[in-house]
Amino acid sequence: MRGTIISTRRLKLRTWRMSDVASYHQHCNTNAVLKYLGDVVSQSAVKHEVRWFKRDQARNGHTFWAMERKRDGALLGFCGIIHVRERESILNGKLEVGWRLRADAWGCGYATEAAEAVIDWAEWELPDELLLARIHRDNDASQALARRVGMRRARAIEARLTDYDAEHYVFRLKL
């Protein structure tokens, strides 16, 4: 399996390595980063998540890929596309585009650069699909990012959200 999936001017979106666990745990598993996503978890839980990303890549040819800065090789977070596998969610089985970025990299345009590249990739690799993004209602920065990359609110889907997803807006983009 090749390592780099997508390359941009400043970033590599690549397959995960088990050696990413420590950096991912340190930088992307903080109260600031997880403010709208949940609680900080153990390094063992992060290792489980990285293994899931690796299995998802092997199964589907895509996942939430590791986002690496080219300049210094720093792991900044992730960006990519998964098939939602959450029976409680109305989005179960749908394609979800997502991103997570370490706090010290916020405001540098990395998330936009990565999300645009992922959508460009998806237009070729997943033509005619519908991409969805679940974003917490209070997460203005992620909502703005979704709009910058051409997504718009999917109010018809939102009207059918269960309690499981109730705190989120859903954004959509038809490829």
Image: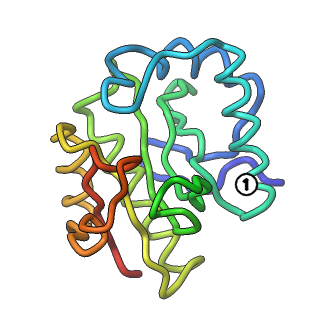
Depicted 128 relative to depicted 65: above or below = below
Q: Secondary structure at mark 1?
A: helix
Of the pair 42 and 24, the residue shown nearer to us: 42
Q: Residue furthest toward the front?
A: 163
Q: Is residue 144 left or right of residue 68?
A: left
List x then y, in percent, for residue 173.
33, 73
Q: Which residue is depicted at the point 52% across and 85% down?
A: 127
Residue 71 vs residue 148: left or right? right
Judge whether residue 150 can be spotted in this image: no
Quadrant the N terminus occupies? bottom right
Q: Position of residue 95 (x, y in %)?
A: 52, 66
Residue toward you, 93 or 116: 93
Tell me the quarter of the image containing the C terminus.
bottom left
The structure residue drawn at horizontal position 79% and vertical position 61%, both measured from the top left corner, is 59
Q: Is residue 65 left or right of residue 103?
A: right
Q: Is residue 50 above or below residue 64?
A: above
Q: Residue at x 25, y 44 (%)?
A: 142
How many marks the image carries: the answer is 1
Task: Mark 1: give few (<14), some (14-19) or many (20+) Cα within 10 Å.
Answer: some
Label 1 sits on residue: 57
| Quarter location, residue 152 | bottom left
- Provide residue 77's location: percent of width, then percent of height: 49, 32
Q: Give the amino acid type for the residue marked by disc 1 in the picture.
A: Gln
At which x and y percent is residue 123? 48, 78
Question: Hey, which residue is sitting farthest right in the picture?
Answer: 1
Front residue of this view, candidates 132 and 155: 155
**Residue at horizontal 49%, vertical 18%?**
29
Q: Is residue 74 above or below residue 138?
A: above
Q: Looking at the image, can residue 2 be seen? A: yes
